[in-house]
Each structure stands twice: as C-alpha cells, then as structure tokens.
Amino acid sequence: MKVGILGGGQLARMIALAGYPLGLKFIVLDPDPNAGAAGLSEHLHGAYDDPALLAELAEKADVVTYEFENVPAHVAEFLSSHTTVYPPANALAVSQDRLLEKNFFKELGIGTAPYAQVDSLADLKNAMTTMGYPAILKSRRMGYDGKGQVVLMSAGDLAAAWEAMQGAAAIVEGFVPFRREVSIIAARRPSGDIVFYPLSENRHSGGILRVASACADDAEQGMAEDYVRRLLEKLDYVGVIALELFDVGGQLLANEFAPRVHNSGHWTIEGSETSQFENHLRAILDLPLGSTQTRGFAAMVNFIGGLPQTEEILKLDHAHLHLYDKAPRKGRKVAHATIRSEDLEQFEQTREKLTNLAKQTDDS
Ligand code: ATP
Ligand code: MG
Ligand code: MG
C-alpha cells in the first residue's frame, strides 16, 4: 500500500517512519525540494494545487492524508473525487477557519472563550464594548505557532492591532485565565472505533509549544474524551485528531483542533504502546487501532531555532532525539527529544535538563 501525504515536513517524516515497519510506502507532495520527509519518501515537488501533480498523487496513492490543515479546500475535494482522502475534507474546512471552528464547538455544546467576528475596526471596537481586556485578535485563517495574533490590553491598542491584520478577516477572543493547557489526541477508524491517548499538559511561550507531558489518570480525562468524541462523530472523522483545551479551574474550554497528528503527541513515539503516527496510519487504512497505553512517564521538549550539540542530548538517560533535517531559522522547530522512564525522579531530571538545553539555543 502507498500512502500519499500533502506536506513533507517533520510530521510527514514521522508518519513515514511509523509506516515502514508495516510495509507501507509513501509519496509526499511539497513545494520545498528540501522538505524534511523528502529524503525518506517519493517526492512530488511543486505547488499543492498543481493539477498534474495532484492527478499523479491520486493515481499513485491508495489513500491520501495531510500533515497540515492549510491545504486549499478545493485540493482536498479534487483528491476526494479520485482517491480515498482521510481525514475528510469537511474537517479540514472547519479547522482552517477559526470562526467556523468556534461556531462548531458551540453547536456541539463544547465551551470556548467568548469570541466575536471581526471584519473591520468598527466590528472590533463594537465587540470590545462587551468583552473584557485582555483579549486576543486572531486572523481567521493561516495562523500557526501564534502567528497572526495580537494581544489587546486596552482600547488604545485596537487601531494598531486591526492595522496589523492587514485587512484579513479575524476573530477577537477573550483571554482565558487558564490554570494549564492540555490537549487530547484520539484516532477513529471508518468503522467508528475510537482510541484516546492520555491528556498531554502543554507549556507554551510566545505562542509556541515548548514542553508536552503525558498526564496519568487525569481528573479531566473523561471530559476531554467526551468533547473529542463529539467532534469525531459529528465529522464522521477518520484518522488522528488533536483537540487543544484550556483548563480553567477544572472546566475545559476548547481552543482549536488539528485534523492531523500533533506536536503535543510526539511523546507517544517512545511513550506509548502505539504512537499517534502509527495509529493515524492504522485508522486511515482501516486497520485495528493499537493500544494507547503509556509506557511509564513520558514527555517531549521542542528545540526551536537552534540545537545544542547532539551529544549533550544523547548522553542523557531516557532521552530520545528526533532531528527533522530542517535548516535552522528563527522560531522554527528543528528537532524534539522525548523522555520516557518508569522512574519519576529520573524522568523529571531528564525533562529539566532537556528544557534547559532547549532554552540555551532557543532564538524565538
Ligand atoms: P498552533 O501552533 O497551536 O496551531 P495557533 O497559531 O493556531 O497555534 P493558538 O493555539 O490559538 O494559535 O494560540 C497559541 C497559544 O496562545 C495558545 O496555546 C495559548 O498559549 C495562547 N492563547 C491563544 N488563545 C488564547 C486565549 N483566548 N486565552 C489565553 N491564551 C491564549
Ligand atoms: Mg493552530
Ligand atoms: Mg494551538
């Protein structure tokens, strides 16, 4: 079987690495000739909406998936009419647009921060007459790692914040005074079988994920599973999904979902019986889903912009290094390390050492 992937970055690379033991082959479509997965897979090099390349991808791949959600909707629709595409194109459409996404959460009875549609400075001023400060103005489309977002501290910030949107359609959200951020990753097969991973507790700064840690027996696990199940069933979803949540005094508010494997699930590579990458492949190929049982304590630390000497990471007990084969650039994720151990003290020590190493070379 050959799996096509739209996007050839580190997520595609880790999907391919999980698929080789299952005898799978991969073909990626990516405009960047040096995409991180290209060395591992057959690579179609060109634009995502190049009709000839899409036709070739549909012809060669038994199933097509993607590693990022900003694939143009018409591309997913075109591919869907020529081959099997999972997750379904409607999941992509909802997750691409923060307004549709928030409305969708609301329709499913899942709480969110207060939000309002903003298409003009007048809309923004009007929304802020009822919404308290601080708040965040976010472009509806194309944002990731906190890009396209401006924090609003007072009415004096509104004009410059709207200017920064450069006319892009936006939403404004109330700032959530969360106790912590968590995410839940789940996988669903066409038959409707679902597996859930334990919650991941995620530490961000500057809008970028830094550290993600598996939560054993978390009090909020059941609520998160209930929310993500509603999404999966409503979307008739197939594949891995990630739902990002704010924990506010034991209540969970949805921030956004990603219709793909997710950075907060990288610890599942060594930390779970079956990784998110393998379960994504099993789901889209309609194979039995694997156990999501955690193997001891598990966490992940991102390396952003730069990397310490790899020896510094490799010499740490219980650390596992994953390089993405990407040229360093300011604020860019270039690698991560996972930590997995049965021993809590060792686990915490290694996580702290890795976190400190990452801070030394982080340029964001
Ligand atoms: P990602 O890389 O996760 O796709 P993104 O650019 O889509 O990021 P968000 O996830 O919406 O952006 O925001 C990035 C981070 O900014 C959040 O994880 C959180 O730390 C902070 N943040 C975003 N919205 C809010 C909010 N309403 N209240 C408090 N913090 C927020
Ligand atoms: Mg996002
Ligand atoms: Mg996010």
Image (cartoon, rainbow, N blue to C red):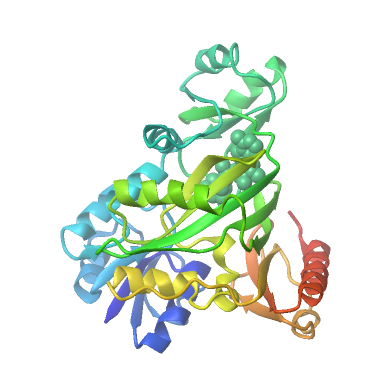
Screen quadrant of the N terminus: bottom left
Residue 259: x %, y % from top left: 41, 55
Left or right: 270 as drawn, with respect to 84: right
- Identified at 38% across, 47% down, the residue is 231
Q: How many marks?
A: 0
Viewer-nearest residue: 230 or 240 = 230
**Residue 107 higher or lower than 234, as above or below:** above
Quadrant assignment, res 350: bottom right
**Residue 226 higher or lower than 14, as above or below:** above
- Identified at 79% across, 86% down, the residue is 315
**Residue 111 higher or lower than 275, as above or below:** above
Residue 335: x %, y % from top left: 64, 70
Viewer-nearest residue: 203 or 344 = 344
Left or right: 152 as drawn, with respect to 97: right
Q: Is residue 146 visible?
A: no
- Identified at 28% across, 73% down, the residue is 285
Q: Is residue 310 visible?
A: yes
Residue 149: x %, y % from top left: 60, 36
Quadrant assignment, res 177: top right
Residue 96: x %, y % from top left: 41, 44
Viewer-nearest residue: 122 or 95 = 95
**Residue 193 higher or lower than 320, as above or below:** above
- Identified at 61% across, 42% down, the residue is 246
